Amino acid sequence: MPTKRGAVRQPDRRSRKGTRKPSAAAKSAKKTAKSKASIKHQIKVGQTLIENVEGHAARTDSPEFVSARATLHKIIGSLEPNPYGPGPIQAHHGGSIWLHGGAGDNDWHLVLNWAGIEWSAQFCCDPAKVDALRRNALAVTNGFPNTLPALEALGYTDTALLRTEIKTPDDIAHYVDSIWNSCLPIPQPRHTGSIKPSNALACGVHTYPEPMCGIPRFMRSDFVPFVVDSTTKTASVVAPVAPRHSGDGRVRVLFAERGNPLHALHQRAHGEGAALILAPSSPVARKAFAKQG
């Protein structure tokens, strides 16, 4: 019987599914793979469909992006310890705005613009809206007058872009690959990775919803938010329902991949405005709190 709106739903084993026929997205992806288009930068999104971020034959890194990425690695190399986590640091097109405080070579700070533009999205961009992002980045950077000289000292010579109005597709492409958009540093597992038993924190932003990917940046190290189902090898994402030491061992399901035993239950509860809460005795809750003893 359906629960009332806002009610808490407990998992029901009867809702588990058996093997399913290939989805329409999977069939489409299979057909796409036979085309002549390059798939060099193919990204598997949410484990259920494939997005080709090219939109044209082979994509290569632009000189602007090569320069911005090299500068990013110089900035990261000056930070001790590296606050972005272990693993090879990759540059994500996430709306990065790097600022220098003027108190030593390593006085770098990162803020984000209200939107980041992925490389593949640039061809639908409105120049006026991209220019609004540029003007916002300029306003923020002007508050830190040491920034542009510090970037130039690292060899970044594209600083005039920040004061150049964006009007054309070439202007958009230049801005998209600049340090003011393309240089959000993310370790590879959290950029393009996928959760697996060997690395339960490989929650790539190109693979899972961004709110899920942000959890490892601020969570306690003894909580396990990503739980891999031993049978299907798919992941669910959970969070405690109460503060630490409250004695409440329940967890709220935030996300579950397709094929996971909790996926259908989570979708149904979400559709009814309810939360899917698991009891402390559930295997998922026990795994989530396992490190806390």
Image (spheres, rainbow, N blue to C red):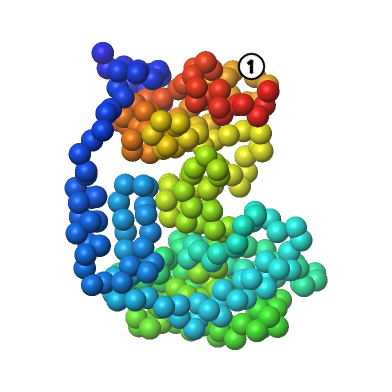
Location of residue 156 in the rendering, given as x and y in whole percent from the top left corner: 61, 82
> Residue, x 37% and y 28% (percent of image)?
261
Query: Compared to 53, does 171 lie above or below?
Result: below
Point out residue 211 in the picture as x, y percentages from the top left corner. 48, 45
Residue 230 drawn at (x, y percent): 45, 31
Q: What's the amino acid at mark 1?
A: Gly
Say which of 283 and 142 sits in front. Answer: 283
Question: Residue 178: in sight, yes or no?
Answer: yes
Q: Residues within 10 Å of mark 1 (few under 14, many from 20)?
A: few
Q: Which quadrant of the rendered structure holds the C terminus?
A: top right
- The residue positioned 54% from the left and 66% from the top of the image is 91
Q: Is residue 264 left or right of residue 195?
A: left
Circle 1 residue: 247
Q: Is residue 136 something one can see in this rendering?
A: no
Tell which of 288 and 65 is nearer to you: 288
Circle 1 SS class: loop
**Residue 97 falls in image quadrant:** bottom right
Residue depicted at x 77% and y 72%? 105
Residue 240 as seen in the image, left or right of residue 108: left
Image point (38%, 38%), residue name: 257
Indicate whether 73 appears above or below 252: below
Q: Residue furthest top?
A: 1
